[in-house]
Amino acid sequence: MNAPTTPYLDLPQIPAEFQQCFDSQRAAYLEHPEPTLAERRQDLLNLSRMLKENREALVAAINADYGSRSEFETLFAEFFVVLETIKDSSKNLKKWMKPQRRHIDMLTYPGASNRVIPQPLGVVGIIVPWNFPLNLTFSPLAAIFAAGNRAMVKMSENSRHLALLLAQISPKYFPEDKLKFFEDGGGRGPAFSSIPFDHLLFTGSGTTGRAVMANAARNLTPVTLELGGKAPAIVGPDFSIKTAAERIMWVKMFNAGQICTNIDYVFIPEGKVDEFATHCKRLFAERFPDINANDYTSIIDQRSYERLQGTLEDARAKGATLVNLSEGQTPNAQARKFPPHLVLNPTPDMILSQREIFGPILPVRTYKGQMEVARYINSHDRPLAIYPFTNDKELQRFYISRVMSGGVSVNEALLHVGQHDLPFGGVGPSGMGHYHAIEGFNTFSKLRPVFYQGPFSAIQMLFQPPYAGRAMKILNLMIRWKT
């Protein structure tokens, strides 16, 4: 009789360069499974050196991939935040690596002890998106190397210049059996996620994340998924519209809105939309007097540019009011400088209400009461973040307790992601798992429980069969003690 077929074992063909690197890293891990504190700190130092010593080339490569990427945004979000993360990891590493003492019942296990020992998993895969390619490579690598692992990194097809540069310079800092970078292209993504890694980290869209998780599941590879979604900002009735506009506009225009934790739509109290729109137009004119200047980042590719155009046209055709914040300026479509827009009166049937926008388009919704806001958000997928703007402590607590999300910034947006001692991660459709801080170290470690028996074993002495008689009497007595 033929055995039943198992379609889930039909894995994509893994390219030779992937397989050879994985085999090399796995062999190196087995040869030296637990790097010392000094070795791990050296790895972190080498990560930092790799960034600092190649700063100009890395900035230029990212700029080339975008067509025009603000140098300030690259240095702030891709260098400063990551260097801070690496420094914090090195500082706390000795504490993180210590075995943890755990409680033991001394009446049942006299003389024994319990420990949880963090140990390296082995070889970790990272699939990196294009929007913050250095940050979303080096921040995870800080946790992965702190935990004592090795890493294979697949860059995005939209990060070709950066991928080539990282592949070129990486061997100066790490052997390939420790770290290796790969370009995308040729449909190799499914093959990479099919490698039997000891852990796989993916950052990107929910659609691709589902495919990555399905491929990883065939090997029972554990995954951390950092996805996106529609993160809302809520401006409370007590909060200054002017201040809210200033803070929301800074985040929404950063990287031309191409951030997974960016504000996807905003709730404004009824009667205050015109004031909000007026401030937004003024702020954009002050901060970006020329939309074609280098401070305003390009949309990553033509397909994304056309998608945003289609999103606006769909909203216009379905009755929304569009407010062009760059009115009076002439965008350069060839440079993919997309004019930022507010979209007033959005409806559920519009594309921008159904999909993550990922660009400089901000739908503005109005509301009368806080329950209305909570019900709307909770009727959709759980977002990667929420951003309540209010000085009312009770209202802050209301949104934090009533609306589940991956993270929260209060009276600000996005900045919770940059806190080196806070974990980062989604929930439900916006992701699973965490990294950053000690949570990142734990994610890429096996927190291994170890029981150490004492000089003698009470269990072996008291609970030998036949159980009737002494063993059962002692067990019944112990059960009574526990109630």
Image: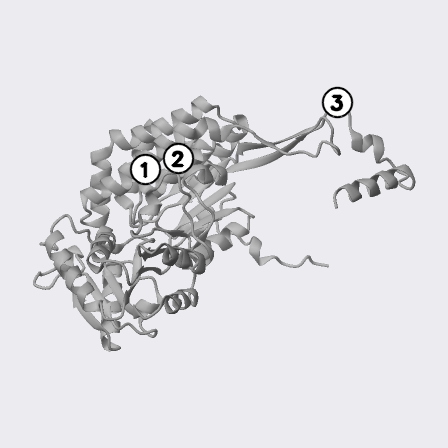
Q: Position of residue 269 (x, y in %)?
A: 28, 67
Q: How many other residues sit within 10 Å of disc 2, few (<14), some (14-19) or many (≥20)?
A: many
- Please name the amino acid that badge 2 sits on: Ala
Cβ–Cβ under 8 Å for marks 2 and 1: yes
Q: Which of the marked residues, 2 or 1, is nearer the chain's N terminus?
A: 1
- Residue bearing mark 2: 142
Residue at position x 41%, y 59% in the image: 398
> Circle 2 — which element?
helix
Colour setting: one colour
Q: Mark 3 points at which residue?
A: 455
Position above or below: 81 against 287? above
**Residue 299: in sight, yes or no?**
no
Residue closest to the eye, 21 or 198: 198
> How would you rate the neighbour count of disc 1 (Cα within 10 Å): few for under 14, some for 14-19, many for 20 or more?
many
* Residue 173 visible somewhere in the drawing: yes
Please tell me the numbered disc located at residue 82.
1
Q: Nearer the viewer, residue 455 or 163?
A: 455
Q: How far apart are the alpha carbons under marks 2 and 1? A: 9 Å
Three-letter amino acid code of the residue under disc 3: Pro
At which x and y percent is residue 411?
A: 30, 52
Depth check, front residue: 132 or 285: 285
- Across and down, in percent, residue 440 comes to 45, 39
> Mark 2 and mark 3 in contact (Cβ < 8 Å)?
no
Describe residue 189's horizontal placement relative to residue 458 as left or right: left
